[in-house]
């Protein structure tokens, strides 16, 4: 179990959560962004074009995903769920559950070999 102290917690890494985290991080606040899915991006990364401008969704979303992942003031927790939240007077104590990925994310190069080996695919 690791303890981390931050200024703000953002729950959900869709376009709204990513932008909130980036705005806070750019102002110098330390932010934790918790996303329950394996990746941030939310609904928007699954769409082709946005109405009414017909802008390309991934062209808007992927730079923000990358900016969040590499922002020095944002700690990203994907495949995680907030378990408990307790007010302490000075702030909040939040418990976050990291779900198992069965791969060592720190060594992942994105080669997808594990995906091809997975019997579920
Ligand atoms: C089919 C479809 C077409 C659309 N087309 C358009 C369009 O053309 N133009 C337009 O303007 N809008 C469109 N929208 C709407 C637009 O996609 C959404 O308004 C926008 O993506 C919402 O962003 P969001 O960040 O608020 O939520 P989401 O994108 O839903 O992101 C929420 C994130 O929070 C995570 N989350 C939720 N609960 C928890 C939790 N308890 N703990 C951790 N993480 C959590 C979710 O996994 C998700 O990643 C469309 C939506 C859909 C579904």
Image (cartoon, rainbow, N blue to C red):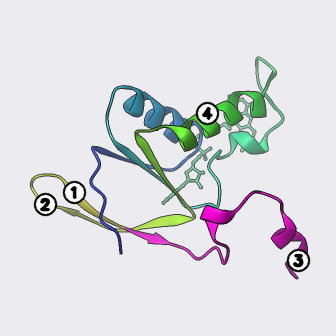
Give the quadrant of ligand 1: top right
Q: Which mark is residue 92?
A: 1
Q: On the image, numbered disc 2 is attached to which residue? A: 88
Label 1 close to label 3 by CB (< 8 Å): no
| Left or right: where 76 falls relative to 38 | left
Q: Position of residue 117 (x, y in %)?
A: 88, 77
Q: CB at mark 2 closer than 8 A to ligand 1?
A: no
Q: Is residue 100 above or below residue 74?
A: below
Mark found first going from the N terminus, 4 or 1: 4
Disc 4 or 2, which lies upstream in sequence?
Answer: 4
Instruction: Using the image, determine if residue 89 lies above or below residue 80.
Output: above
Cβ atoms under marks 2 and 1 closer than 8 Å: yes
Work out whether residue 3 or residue 38 is closer to the camera in this orientation and state it.
3
Q: Is mark 3 within 8 Å of ligand 1?
A: no
Residue in the picture at 70% in, 62% down:
108
Please, what secondary structure does the residue beneath circle 3 have? helix
Asked if marks 4 and 1 touch (Cβ < 8 Å), the reply is no
């Amino acid at each position: 179990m690791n303890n981390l102290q931050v200024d703000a917690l953002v729950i959900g890494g869709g376009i709204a959560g990513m932008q909130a985290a980036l705005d806070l991080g750019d102002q110098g606040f330390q932010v934790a962004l918790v996303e329950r899915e394996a990746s941030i991006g939310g609904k928007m990364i699954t769409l082709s074009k946005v109405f009414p401008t017909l802008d390309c969704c991934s062209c808007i979303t992927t730079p923000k995903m990358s900016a969040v992942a590499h922002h020095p003031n944002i700690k990203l927790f994907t495949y995680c769920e907030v378990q408990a939240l307790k007010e302490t007077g000075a702030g909040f104590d939040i418990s976050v559950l990291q779900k198992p990925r069965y791969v060592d994310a720190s060594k992942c190069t994105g080669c997808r070999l594990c995906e091809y080996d997975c019997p579920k695919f």
